[in-house]
Amino acid sequence: MSEWDPKWGPPPPPPDEGPAPRFHVPQELDAPRQPTRAKRPALVDAFALGMAASALSGLFVSPGTVGGSAHLYGAGCGLVLGLGVTWFFWMGRSWAYWLVVLGSVLSLSGFAVWLAPVELTFRLSPTWKTKMVADACFGAVMLIVLSRGSVRAFFRGPPGSRDPRTR
């Protein structure tokens, strides 16, 4: 009974073999393609945390020139936009990099609090003046570090890539 009888029909295929594939796909082509991106520098992580803390501090430090609800509305909008840009900055998007560079340049105006006469800044609370100067110092440090080659390479994306999804 070990042999197959032809009156029962064609013999079944051996248990280890299935139908033959119609064509062969190499394993390296079958796997999804992952773009090669420079590793995220540790300074990008530190700056993203600092930017998030700066955005959050706007909720708790009032300039002293506007009322409570107007301040909370402005600070809330600033928080949502700031955390959104911070997220995309941390993810390595080049447009977020340029927004952060622009914000760092604009934050340097916080040093004007030291230079301006008291008559122009008397309405600002001392904690707001301190926040402006701290943001200006943070912006100056960010400008210096963001111009380093390893940080710029992270935001540039894979070499030769023009695909906006990998930038």
Image (spheres, helix red, strand yellow):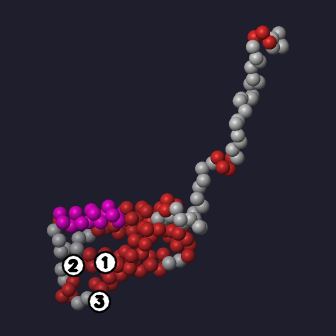
Type of secondary structure dominating the magenta stretch: helix
Q: Which residue is mark 2?
A: 124
Q: In the rendered structure, are the residues bearing label 2 and label 1 in contact, judged by CB atoms less than 8 Å apart?
A: yes
Residue 79 percent across, percent down from the top left: 31, 63
Closest to the observer: 80 or 155?
155
Q: Which residue is mark 3?
A: 115
Task: State which quadrant residue 102 falls in.
Answer: bottom left
Residue 34 position (above or below residue 24): below
Earlier sequence position, callout 2 versus callout 1? 2
Residue 144 position (above or below residue 8): below
Q: Residue drawn at (27%, 62%), measured in percent from left and top?
A: 76
Q: Residue drawn at (49%, 62%), measured in percent from left and top?
A: 164
Q: Amino acid at mark 1?
A: Met
Q: Amino acid at mark 3?
A: Leu
Q: Amino acid at mark 2?
A: Leu
Q: Which residue is mark 1?
A: 132
Q: Residues within 10 Å of mark 2 (few under 14, many from 20)?
A: some
Q: Which residues are magenta?
A: 69-83
